[in-house]
Amino acid sequence: MLMVAGGETVSAIKAAAADPGSCWIPGGCLPVHDVEMYNIKHKVWTKMAPSALPRYRFGAAYYAGTVYAFGGHTHGEVAIRDVETFYYVPHRDAFLHYKMTASMAVGR
């Protein structure tokens, strides 16, 4: 399996005013909630439950069956301090997503 999460898309309103397709203008890019998984065996993309936070320019790591997303930015270049975890539940119609805030991580 391959998981793709987050990213950014160009704001049509901001881009039209400047350079179409440009993320380099203030507010030109918008973070997305999208999460998709690719099944290599069946060659099929599946839309998963969206992430709790729209996130782009972030890091991610896989450990013991869990994908962790950390850092990055959300709307207006605001830095994110929360860690999100993504779990794959082997059931056709059930997906699970859990968000752990920075305050919840204290003392772990």
Image (spheres, grey):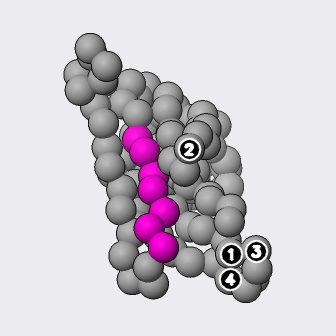
Residue drawn where x is 39% and y is 83% of the image: 93
Q: Is residue 89 magenta?
A: yes
The tag earlier along the polypeptide, 1 or 4, is 1
The tag earlier along the polypeptide, 3 or 2, is 3
Image location (x, y in percent) of residue 79:
43, 25
Nearest to viewer (mark 3 / mark 2)? 2
Image location (x, y in percent) of residue 12:
52, 61
- Type of amino acid at the residue the image marks with label 3: Ile
Tell me: residue 75, above or below residue 42.
above
Looking at the image, which residue sits at the far front? 64
Q: Is residue 15 magenta?
A: no
Q: Are marks 3 and 1 in contact (CB under 8 Å)?
A: yes
Image quadrant of residue 46? bottom right
Q: Which residue is mark 2?
A: 64
Nearest to viewer (mark 4 / mark 2)? 2
Q: Which mark is residue 44?
A: 4
Mark 4 Cα-neighbour bin, 10 Å: few <14, some 14–19, many ≥20: few
- Type of amino acid at the residue the image marks with label 1: Asn
Q: Secondary structure at mark 4?
A: strand
Q: Which residues are magenta?
A: 84-90
Residue drawn where x is 45% and y is 52% of the image: 86
Q: Which residue is mark 1?
A: 39
- Type of amino acid at the residue the image marks with label 4: Val
Marks 1/4: CA–CA distance: 5 Å
Marks 3/2: CA–CA distance: 20 Å
Q: Are marks 4 and 2 in contact (CB under 8 Å)?
A: no
The tag earlier along the polypeptide, 4 or 2, is 4
Image location (x, y in percent) of residue 78:
40, 28
